Image: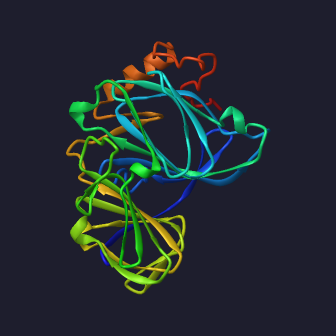
Amino acid sequence: MSNINLIIEERAADIGKFLVGRLLPFRQKRMVGPFIYIDHMGPVKLNERSGFDILPHPHIGLSTLTFLFEGSIMHRDSIGNAIEIKPNEVNWMTAGKGIVHSERTPDHLRNSEMHMHGLQIWIALPKHLEQMNPEFFHIAENEIPAWQQDGISFKLIAGEAFGRKSGVPVYSKLYMVEIKSKATQHISLGEYLYGESGLYILEGGVESDGNVYGPKQMLVTKDSHLCNFTIQANSTVYIFGGEPFPEERFIDWNFVASSKELIEEAKRKWREQTFDKIKGDETEYIPYPTLSKK
């Protein structure tokens, strides 16, 4: 990883009852390829008094990817899906012109202690698909490409890389790869990657040009074709990236778009509560945030 352009440290962000470590967006790097938002949730211990409850809220112009290491989340949305997300599964929701969803502790786990740990990610849609109809897909662990190479475990969570293709129906050239190694060894990935790349260290560490980087850091490369580094023993890292879009993306709360007009329209619809509702979860919602006056 001799071409490191930027080192991003997790920053604490409050998502309501819950603090996460935010990696993107960052003031010096708003996106990595089409990835516009990356949160590291936990690890945190939950109980019956502190369940995971993200009330109904809207999105436009993006796909969300939820990938858990521990715990369980009940996903419900306004196009009729209700499914429990478990570790090592991929929850992929494309908002397009608009969707509402909630994320809660499953009812059968509310009276028990539970550890929550995972990644929540937003991927911007190409401009010509920003107003597509919303979609939802759930990919089981056994449907995710996984393989061993030179003693290293790889998993292609989304996109295309290494001559393989994930079952997640993405809409632009991208990749999200999990890499695990029990031993210290050198890895050279440049021939398999493209576009922009970011490497996030979940546990363990990596070494590049004599520098050692550890958990909660993301390294952004200047050129993905030069992506090589030494992974330390008992490490887990994630590589995100892909081809960047030619147009700027605007982000306001839960809305992403290539035009401010689309965002303003979404804000108006949410304030007026004219988005479609979630069947069985219609009574509560997160209001559009307003700045408090001092």
Which quadrant, please, contains the N terminus?
A: bottom left
**Residue 127 in the image, given as x and y percentages of width and height:** 23, 35
Which residue is at the far front? 142
* Residue at image coords 62%, 29%: 293
| Position of residue 39 measured from the top left corner of the image (x, y, whole percent) | 51, 50
Left/right of residue 293 with respect to residue 256 in the rendered view: right
The residue at 60%/18% (across/down) is 280
When the figure is inspected, residue 163 is found, relative to residue 49, above or below; the finding is: below
- Tell me what residue is drawn at x 66 percent, y 37 percent: 105
Residue 125 in which image quadrant: top left
Judge from the rendering whether residue 192 lies leftward or rightward of residue 265; answer left or right.
Answer: left
Q: Residue 264: x percent and y percent?
A: 38, 23
Q: Identify the residue at image location x=30%, y=74%.
A: 3
| Residue 151 visible (yes or no) | yes
**Residue 197 position in % (x across, y down):** 32, 62
Residue 222 vs 289, above or below: the answer is below
**Is residue 103 rendered to the left or right of residue 27?**
right
